Every structure is written in structure tokens, then in C-alpha cells.
Image: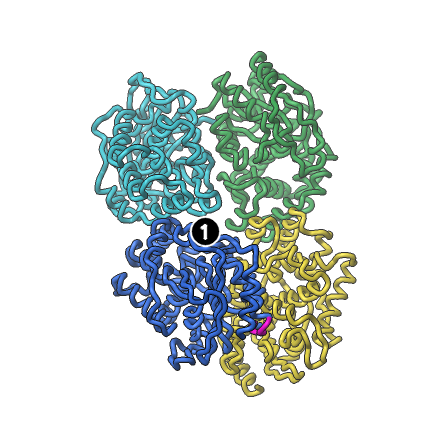
Chain colours: A cyan, B blue, C yellow, D green
Amino acid sequence: MQEILDDIAEVMSTATERGQVADYIPELAAVNPNQFAISVALPNGQTYSSGCAQQLFSIQSISKVFSLTLALGKLGDAVWNKVGREPSGDPFNSIVQLEHEQGKPRNPFINAGAIAIVDAIMMGHEPKELLAEILQFVRFIANDNSIAIDEKVALSELATGHRNTALASFMASFGRIEHEIPQVLGTYYHQCSISMSCEQLARSGLFLVSDGVNKSTGIRVVSSRRARRINSLMLMCGHYDGSGEFAYRVGLPGKSGVGGGILAIAPNKASIAVWSPGLDKIGNSKLGTVALEMLVQRTGWSIF
Amino acid sequence: MQEILDDIAEVMSTATERGQVADYIPELAAVNPNQFAISVALPNGQTYSSGCAQQLFSIQSISKVFSLTLALGKLGDAVWNKVGREPSGDPFNSIVQLEHEQGKPRNPFINAGAIAIVDAIMMGHEPKELLAEILQFVRFIANDNSIAIDEKVALSELATGHRNTALASFMASFGRIEHEIPQVLGTYYHQCSISMSCEQLARSGLFLVSDGVNKSTGIRVVSSRRARRINSLMLMCGHYDGSGEFAYRVGLPGKSGVGGGILAIAPNKASIAVWSPGLDKIGNSKLGTVALEMLVQRTGWSIF
Amino acid sequence: MQEILDDIAEVMSTATERGQVADYIPELAAVNPNQFAISVALPNGQTYSSGCAQQLFSIQSISKVFSLTLALGKLGDAVWNKVGREPSGDPFNSIVQLEHEQGKPRNPFINAGAIAIVDAIMMGHEPKELLAEILQFVRFIANDNSIAIDEKVALSELATGHRNTALASFMASFGRIEHEIPQVLGTYYHQCSISMSCEQLARSGLFLVSDGVNKSTGIRVVSSRRARRINSLMLMCGHYDGSGEFAYRVGLPGKSGVGGGILAIAPNKASIAVWSPGLDKIGNSKLGTVALEMLVQRTGWSIF
Amino acid sequence: MQEILDDIAEVMSTATERGQVADYIPELAAVNPNQFAISVALPNGQTYSSGCAQQLFSIQSISKVFSLTLALGKLGDAVWNKVGREPSGDPFNSIVQLEHEQGKPRNPFINAGAIAIVDAIMMGHEPKELLAEILQFVRFIANDNSIAIDEKVALSELATGHRNTALASFMASFGRIEHEIPQVLGTYYHQCSISMSCEQLARSGLFLVSDGVNKSTGIRVVSSRRARRINSLMLMCGHYDGSGEFAYRVGLPGKSGVGGGILAIAPNKASIAVWSPGLDKIGNSKLGTVALEMLVQRTGWSIF
């Protein structure tokens, strides 16, 4: 495994087409695009890495997997009253679908859906409490209390978040947001601004590898059925309108973030995190996708 | 003329299908639907009325004609960099068109367009100054200093304005809003909350009857060419996605508001205001449209 | 008047930006773009012209005004069960609106609407009979029995008409087309392939100038009310998604065709035909629009 | 396995909500809705069945998997110039997406995409030859020469196929269809009208279970990589805008047809066919989906 990862990192170090760093969030635009890391966590707790796998980066939309998991734990299937579970066929920040479907987001992984999820789990909480709970949950599943929020990134998102304000306000106009929009968005931006390294991120996905149980710690996070369904949602919707392409090329459930990270799950085999800040046109890590494609070819881990 | 108006008011007083009062703005929902008024102002200053033509009502979107006129005076054709001049084919508060056209509203009379106009004329002003200027302009063209803003309506709109926040934020995400959104929307809601009677409203349209000059006062408000173009925009876009229907049935440039008012212009003949709070499905005054249809049939004032 | 038209023709003869000749119909693509003609027909029967006003050209979509008039005569308001009367906000050949509105075209002047009109008036006719009737009607209103169909253009359209087949088939899938599609489209293409000169075209619009009566012949074609409503539809929808622009710049009801012709009506004043084959991006005659703008400025004929 | 299938068939026999039989194709509307069958084919060639598993039914859109496989074999990745591979987020017969994306269908499993695939593989063939080749290919992968086309169903589709004509004509208007539309559609309808039993259908999917090889016959149909990618496409797009729901509930790549059949693939485990004619609102077999959900729960075959 170490050899495979080193080979991949070697190839990536000389890649010339590395995509574009996200530029709409100023803090992210400043990240050096010439970085690459990959980590593979096995159910037994072993972790293999190559590249700068301890380097922290902003997990951004990957956090939506964790907030969905938390929401399913707190609300059960009532979550599906708030969001659907179909691919959207539109960009991550599209508002057209919302107008056509009465303000209900297609799935929990587009921005509107993730904002609706934050609103759903805010019930009975102060924003700060909820944020603490989300962070605590991420630390819990990653088994690492050092994980923290990058406040500078959160503020940077807040300052440039007109599109997300539009999405939240639009849902609110259909009566679908129950809390104050600035509080919902503030929590959402902070959740997206969690910083993790590839090693931490890979370990945080272990519960999705083994039917809801992190076998390295023995802790059950969600039921077997729910874990499989989260994986299904990641496959169908985890890469916005590039989800079909990712499924075709990589063949694993995965969730990308505009920070350049991707978390991918090979059921019963491994949790994988890759990071490279340059994005393709749709907003998914360009080298990250290539690296996962190589990894799957070498390991035969495709679910298909 | 008085006889015609009295006949119309008589018919309207017994109408049973009066439409629905706008219910999404609480202050408007409380208005008694059994009211009707009509006023006709002639270029020579004479005014004929029937029904409760001194009763104040919220002019709402009719104010968009005045803010557009003001914007054209201040900015000239640069206004058309902010908004287009095509019918939208969509409801007044649709956001779909904005996503398809990079955040540029189709015309100045849909909500997004009117918000963009407020943003455009805010340049170099405090919101309160701008609001004072808009109100002053309306008083000027109506030649009536008693015209005022109904603060309760403005607050009522503010409290329920998620959709407008969505529209403004969405435009802002394309870099098309230059001022703080709460200030732009606050000004917009106050502008919409101007109260006028049918008599006042009819007189305020006189400059559009006579090529830009209010002949009763002798004051030129806009150039001849601009007056005709404002009339053209009213005809094409003044009734949202019911504009074709209004042109077909009434055949006059007009602008409706969800308060139940309509301002219609018969070029070289008269400025007409009608008011009845019940709306049709598209959001235009139901009896107001019927009354105008009757008036045009009796007077032959159709522009076609 | 003659002087005005000569001035306009003079300016047009040196224009350098003449637009693009329609290239999707091979027969039309072969037309020399350096041609220009303008004719003004007055209610008293006098006609003024400048440029090549006897040159025949393909009237294309201008024919939709005549088929609508015929349909209203045969079916009355039942026509509105087949098509709406709102601007579409979409290109002339868009199919999106049809899917959103259950196969009912927005208005009779977009392609789908005109095809639906042909289907409506085909009732009880063989296609050839109907075609003869349409041609006869055009000859009647133009008071000119020499008007004919250019069979080569019709065949050229037939050979490249996939988009229109799509529109007709799509409407048929909603049960909105009652006759065989090839027959409906064949009739439609032939109707569009009527050839007329500017002089003939200007005369054919006289009934719309004087409330339904061609005053030069004394013949009533339609009722006063219907004539005004046809004018209203031309203003709202006569130039596809450039209708707002045409109303703004020219201020007259008008209908354009991709052959480069425009018929415009100045109510109570004149019927005007212009022709120049080069089109703007939306598909309306570029110089034709400029010429009408000049004419209206010189004559003050704007309806606003 | 037999016990599991019998249990499932037992439950299905008493189900009361069985969905609606497809009514837009007359021949299919006549099928008795109270039928159910399930077959499981293992890589070693063993087949287990319950219900009326020898009963022939119209495979309809399931045939799209076979024509795509054939197209990939003949044209390789050039297929992706004709169609995309993203979920569409729209109904199976939507035309809106085509207008927004220049006539290129989102994926090979919506109607437009499947029609484009037939057009692609028609190259150099007479329609009858191509049809023979498709049928031969299905017989080959199912290892059963008795499989045939139901001509009555094909004619029934032809007679009611306005929507498909619209889709094909619309693509043709973008230059994306190279053959005569009636020939392309005729071939498409015949391909959809292949009749198979659940047992035959289950066996026909075996090559997708074992990386492109039908292990029971030892014949390689496609490369390992291609087989996995076909599975990926089935998962992402195999159930139209119900694909997310199917992935969530069943967790297997699958393709449905409006005849009520579903082919599902459990990689390395089994090929499964279910049939029950009643459809849900989206057009997928209602009981078929429930049966697969039960099967996966009993066997743990979810790919997630």
C-alpha cells in the first residue's frame, strides 16, 4: 500500500495541469496549489500516507457528510422532510431547482441542502452550542481532539457569501428555514471551515467503511443500514454535477470540498483522503480525482 | 366622463368575484376588499373620480415607475447596464431568470429589477437621503406635498421579505449590487409603502400623458422620447406575466401594484388610476383591470 | 413623406453593419444582403416607397399575422384554447416553455404557436385547400391577386425543419395537434414562403390601421376590437425576445420575418413595410428596425 | 436463496399497492398487473426463481443497457461524444435539458440518450441489419437464441411516439442525428420491444457481475473496466429521476423499463431480474423495487 501511495504522490508531484484554486473565498485563494497528500486508513486502524499528509486544509463541503450523519442521528428519517436524495443535475450553488421544487433542496450535499440540514439540527440550540456539537462530533469520529475550526476562513466565507444568503432566504420564503438566517449561515460557514489533515480525514471516514462501526476503536457511530445509505448519497450526489463522472472514473462513494480535499469510501476495505487545492471546472479537486482513479486501478477497490 | 366613471363604479360595487387581497404582507392582508375607486386626470388639470377616490392605499409596485423615471434622470441610459427591457415571462418574484442571465434582471418592473434600480440611484446617498429624494420626486410629479410613506406597511414588508433578500443577495453574488443589502431593501420597501389616493395617483401620471410635460403645471419632468419609452416599458412589462393579457384586454400602458392599484396612461388623452384590493392569480387588481377595460371601451382610448 | 423615405433609404444604402442573412434555410441564405426597401401605405390608398420596393422577398413569420387573423375569423376566441397571448421571454424556436406549460405555446407568433394555429384552421380541410385559402386571404387583404408562394423556399424549409418537427411532435405528445404533422408543417412552410414586395406588404396591413377596415377599398376584414387586439399581440410578441427592444426603440406594433421583412402598424396613420435581409442576433431585420426608428422619429407616429 | 425468493414472491402476491401499468403504450396497458417474478443468476450459471419467471414481458428501457454495451464495443469512448454520463435530474422524456445543452443528452439511459446511441451504431447499416445485430447481441449475452421482438408492441410504440419524435428531431436540429429519424426511431422501438422472461433477463446480466465475463459460459463480453463503468452508469442514471431513491433503498446498479422489469447487478455475486407491471409515479416498477430492497436486506448484497 505504501508503495502504491508513494507512486501516486510521485506522479502528482510532476503534474502540470493542477486546476485552479477556489478564488471566491479569499482565504482559500491564498493556498499554494503545488501541494498534494493522500492517506488510506484501514479498518484495523493502520494508516498509510504520502505527500504532506499532516498539513491542515479546509474540509469545506466534506463537512456536509458529518452534519448529515449528525442530523440522521438526531432526527432520523425526518431529515428527508427537509431535503431530498436525488442528484441535482445543477451546479452546487444553483437556485433554479429550488424555485421549481418549492424550496426543497434536492439533496443534503448541494449548498442549499447543507444549509437546510444545519437549520434542522439547530433546533433548541444556540448557534455556538450547535457548532460545538458539530466540532465535537467530528473529533469523535476522527478520534482526535486536536481538530479545530479556522476562524479566518469562516470570516472570509461570511464576507463573500451572497449566494448562500440567497439560497437560505429563498428557502425561508417557502417557510423552510426555522431559525435566523445569519445564525444558520454563521454555523454553516464555521462547519465548512473545520481544518483537517489527510490523515485525520481518512480516519474520520472509517465508520463508513465497516457498516457504521469504526473497527479501530470499536465504536458504532450509526446503524449498518444508515452507513450504507450515507455512502449511497455520497456516490450519487457527492461531486455536484460531476458525480456521474466521479462514479464512472473512480467508482467509490466520495465527497469533495472546494478546499481541494476528497473523502472516499471503499466499503469493507478502506477510508481514503486526498488533498490537492487545484479544482476542475465543476469545483472538485483535479489531482485528487486523478489520484483516486490511480488508487482504484491499482487496488481494484471499485464498488462496481 | 363623470357618467362613465359612475357607471363603472356602479358595476364594480356589485361585483362578486373580487379576487384575493395580497396576504404575504400582513398590513395589506387587513385591507377591506370591498373598496373601489377610479380617477381620470386630463392634461388640462381636470380630474374626474368615482368611488372612494380620496382613500389612501399602498401603491407598492406602481412606485417602480417613479423610481425608474428618477433613475433615468440621474443616470441616463446607464440604467440599462443594470436592468434589461424585455418582458420576463416569469412571475414577479422569480429567480430562475436571474440565474440564466448572470444576475441581470429582465426589466425594471419585476422585483429584482426594481431593487437593482434602487441600488443604482443610491450612489453617494445615505438611504434616508435617497428615500427623501424618492418621496420628494413623487410629491413633485403629483404636485402634492401631503403624500407620505406608511411606515407600518414598510415594516410589515421588511419582516416577510425573504424572497426579496434572496433576489438582492443573488444579484450581489454576481457583483451587481453595490450597496449594503439591508439598506437597499429598506429603501425599496419604503418606496413601495408610499400611500396615495386614486386622485393623487392619476395626477402623478400626467407627465407620461403629454410627452414628458405635466401640462396642468407646465413642468417638464422628462424628455419626450424618455416619456414614450417609459410608457413602452409599462405596456410590455407593467403587469408581470399578465402583461400580454392586459395589453390585449385594455390596450394601455399600465403598472399594477399588489396593493390593488393600477396606473394607466392614455397618451395625449388622460392619466387613469384605479384601485380595488382584490388581486387575480398573477397579482394584478382584478376589478381594476375590468374597470379599465370598460373605460377603454367607452372612450376608445386604446393605443392600438 | 416621400422625402422622409428617400432620406432613410439614402442612409441605409451606406450602412456597413447590415446583420447576417438567415443561413438555416438554404434558399434564404442566397439572398443579396445589400438590399433595402421601405413602403408606407396610407388609409386613403396612397403608397410611398423608396428602395427596391417591388422586389419580392419571403415574408416568413410575418405570415403569422395573416394566419392568426384568419383563425380568429374562423374560430373566434376558441383560438385562445390553442395558444396563449403572453410574450415568451424565449427564442422563437424554444421548446422549454412548451414542457413547462403542458404543450401550450405562449403566443401565436413564436413558431410553436403558429404551427398550432395552422393545425387549428386545418379542420375539415385538405392541406392544399387550406393553403389555397390562406393564400387567397393574403391576396384579399393586400388587394393583389398576383401574390404567390415561392415553392423553392418551402421545399428548402421542409428539408431543414427538424426544430419545427420537434415543436409539432412535442405539442402532439400533449394531444394538442389534431392533424398529421407532415401536413400541418407542409402547410406552415408554404404559408411562410409567400413572396411579397414591400408595397404589397404595406397595403396588406391597412386593415390593421383603421380598426379592421381597409379604408382604401372600404372592406371590413375584422371587427374593430379584434384589429386592436391583433395590434396588441404584434407589439407584445411580434419580435420574439426582442419585442421589448422593438417597442422601446420603435414604439409601433410590428411583426418581423427571417426573410428580413417587418410589417409595422401606426394606428389611424399608416401601414409600413421595410425589408433588408440582414438580421440581428435575435432574428429581426437589423436595418429594418433602424429604418423604422428613423421613420417614427420623423413622423411622431409612436403609439406611446 | 430459493427460500428468500419464495418469501419475497409470497409477500408480493398479497401486496395491494401495485402501482399503475404504463398506459401511454396501448399494448403495455393491457398487461395484467397482478403478476410478479424474480430470478437470480449466479456466476456459476445456477439460476433461482420464484413467481412467473418464464413469462415473457417487454424489456423496454432495460434494452438501453445492451445497446450501450454494443455501442461501446463498436465505437469505444467515441460514444461519449454523443451522450454524457451525468444523472439528468429530469423525467425520462424531458426535452428541457437538451435545449440547455445544445442537443447533447445527459446520459445513455434517458430516452434522448438511447435514441442517440441507436443513431451512433446505425453507421453503415440498414435499419433491419442493425436490429438483427442488436437482437443477436442480446441472444448472445443471454445465451438464448429464442429471444425475440414483440412486433405488436413495437407498432404500438410507433403509433404513440410523438414525444420521441420530438426528442430525435430536436437533436437533429443541432446536427446530432446522422440518419433518417423514422429509421432511427423504428430501430429504437423494436429494440425496446424485445420480450424476455425474468430468467432470461437475469442470465443476460451475468457479464456485468464478473468484470465483463459471463463465467457460466466463459465468454468475455467487454473489458473489466468497461463492465464496471456500465454498472456505474446504471447506478447513477438507471432509474431516471428516481435513481437516487433506488441507490438509497436498494444499493445496486440497476436499470428499469416501463414494462415493469428491472435488471440489477450485485458485482461478483449475482445478476437479478424482477418483474411486476405496476409502476410508481416516476415510471419504475413499484413491487420490483420493493422486492429488490427485501432481497438486498436478506443477502447483504448492497455495494455500499
Residue drawn where x is 47% and y is 18% of the image: D300
Question: Which residue is tagged 1?
Answer: B96
Q: Is residue B274 above or below residue D74?
A: below
- Assign the N terminus of chain D to one quadrant of the image: top right
Q: Is residue A82 above or below residue C199?
A: above
Magenta stretch?
B298-303
Residue drawn where x is 48% and y is 33% of the image: D244
Q: Position of residue C123 (x, y in %)?
A: 75, 57
Q: Position of residue C226 (x, y in %)?
A: 65, 68
Give the number of marks. 1
Tell me, yes or no, whether the highlighted magenta stretch contains residue C67. Answer: no
Task: Pick the residue in front: D103 or D8.
Answer: D8
**What secondary structure is the stretch in magenta mostly built from?**
loop
Q: Is residue A167 above or below residue A298?
A: below
Residue drawn where x is 36% and y is 56% of the image: B153
Q: Residues within 10 Å of mark 1 (few under 14, many from 20)?
A: some
**B174 relative position to C158: left or right:** left
Q: Amino acid at mark 1?
A: Val
Residue drawn where x is 38% and y is 28% of the image: A75
Q: Position of residue B267 (x, y in %)?
A: 50, 75
Task: Pick the residue in front: C39 or C13.
Answer: C39
Q: Position of residue C203 (x, y in %)?
A: 66, 77
**D194 relative position to D109: left or right:** right
